Amino acid sequence: MRHRFDKYFPWLFIGSDFLFAAFSIFALLSIFNATDLFKEVGLKEMLPLFFFWLSVSTLRKDYEIGRTEGFDKTLVHLTGTIFWFLGAAAVLWEPFHSPNFQLISIGLLGLGMFFFMGAFRIWIHIILRRYRAGGGNIRNAVILGKEGSSSRLVEILNVKKEFGVNFLGYFDDASDCEDTKGKIEDFFVQAPLLDLDFVYINADLDPFEVKRIIDFAEEHHIKPKLIPRASLQLGNNLSFSRYGDFFVVNINEIPLDNYFNSLLKRLFDLVFSSLVIVFILSWMVPLFGILIKMGSKGPVFFVQKRNGVGNKEFNCLKFRSMRANKNADTQQATKNDPRVTKFGAFLRKSSLDEMPQFLNVFMGDMSVIGPRPHTVPMNKTFQTKVERYNSRHKVKPGITGLAQIKGFRGEIDNPVQIRSRVKLDTFYVNNWSFMMDMSIIIETVQKVFFNQENAY
């Protein structure tokens, strides 16, 4: 009964996913027809697109939604499917329906599919979680070896019911708690009677014993999973690299090390910065340039060396808000700073002085969201005073970030502020998701309009 779900769910997913994709394509192309992005695309012309989506989604096994995966994994996998779908559409479909290859229309189709199908698949993900939390699609599991991180795993499985893993007990030679079902040797006798799906093996067990358990599990169609030693259970993100038949553990792997994650973030940066440059900076630069020149002598832009990804230096752009001075690189702006011009005070209060950094984003030195870059002298100082400070340089610096929306922006006048910033920056780096970026953007807009306490 428990495995009937696995038999029918893929077909239910493929069917419902295809129907929603067909609706999405139909709705998007209807909108495009009305705006002349595509030339009179009827239902007959849409049929190949429906077939492309069904083929790509099925071949990529989109219906395989991991029990412990978050929404970000679902969206990342969807992004890959959309790229393959758009590639097929661009090569096999678009040239036959337009005299010219329309990159913009294909891109808009992909963007629309991402939002439509992203919402649908997250909804499916939520339904699966609730179904498992309610006792459906359950998998039975035992743990061999109670030492180290095993008890932590049990706590997680008991709390995260949406994982759908039913912990039956331990097998351990030393432990004798109420959850212990027997010694390691008893596992080989009892396992066939327990209807097991998973066996979690503590890596602290004897290597010969571990190999024996894995061989036994594979013979009895039980999935073996290894619990890493306690030294690796430090909140680090782990992945594996394969060198022929040899595996090594990659410690502190971050989400943006994944190609699709980094590509998704870069595409968003390019689209977002392009829109800002075309529709805002195109008139803001000449207008603000005149006002800045009227306020004091000097250039329109203030160009400052800052540390970016990999600690490499780049030229960070800002609207000049101060009178020319020799201490701009070493002395932070303070409240009622006499160097700040009247128009400069407005720029800093409204955060509009940062707007030219969208040019840095477009050029690839920065991202819309990320840890704020510090000046080179400040960076050198903080490296010696704050533990793991350089971990924030694993990703591109941002125009805004998690630390800024949590209130840590502006002047740094005590060690607590910089340590708090670094903690939040490190959390962002280790737990990045596209949805987190979207929430930071929304909260940044709210802060700009309603909370400027530390901006001066």
Image (spheres, helix red, strand yellow):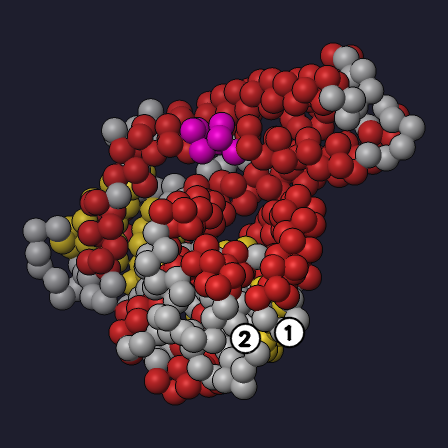
* Label 1 crowd bin: few (<14), some (14–19), many (20+), radius 10 Å: some
Q: Say which residue label 1 marks.
A: 298
Q: Position of residue 80 (x, y in %)?
A: 62, 43
Q: Give the x, y percent position of residue 343.
A: 51, 61
Q: Residue sitting at 54 percent across and 45 percent down? A: 76
Count of number-bearing discs: 2
Left-right relation of 315 to 140: right
Q: Which residue is denoted by mark 2 in the rendering?
A: 323
Q: Residue at x 69, y 17 (%)?
A: 30
Image quarter (top left, top right, bottom left or bottom right) of the N terminus: top left
Q: Amino acid at mark 1?
A: Gly
Left or right side of 54 for 381: left
123 magenta-colored: yes
Q: Which residues are magenta?
A: 118-124
Do residues under tags 2 and 1 come within 8 Å of each other at their CB atoms? Answer: yes
Look at the image and tell me whether residue 367 can be seen: no
Q: In front: 270, or 11?
A: 270
Residue toward you, 204 or 78: 78
Residue pictured at 52% horizontal, 20% vertical: 16
N-term mark: 2 or 1: 1
Q: CA distance from mark 2 to mark 1?
A: 8 Å
Q: Quadrant of the C terminus?
A: bottom left
Left or right placement of residue 408 versus residue 59 in this view: left
Question: In x, y percent, where is residue 153?
Answer: 25, 55
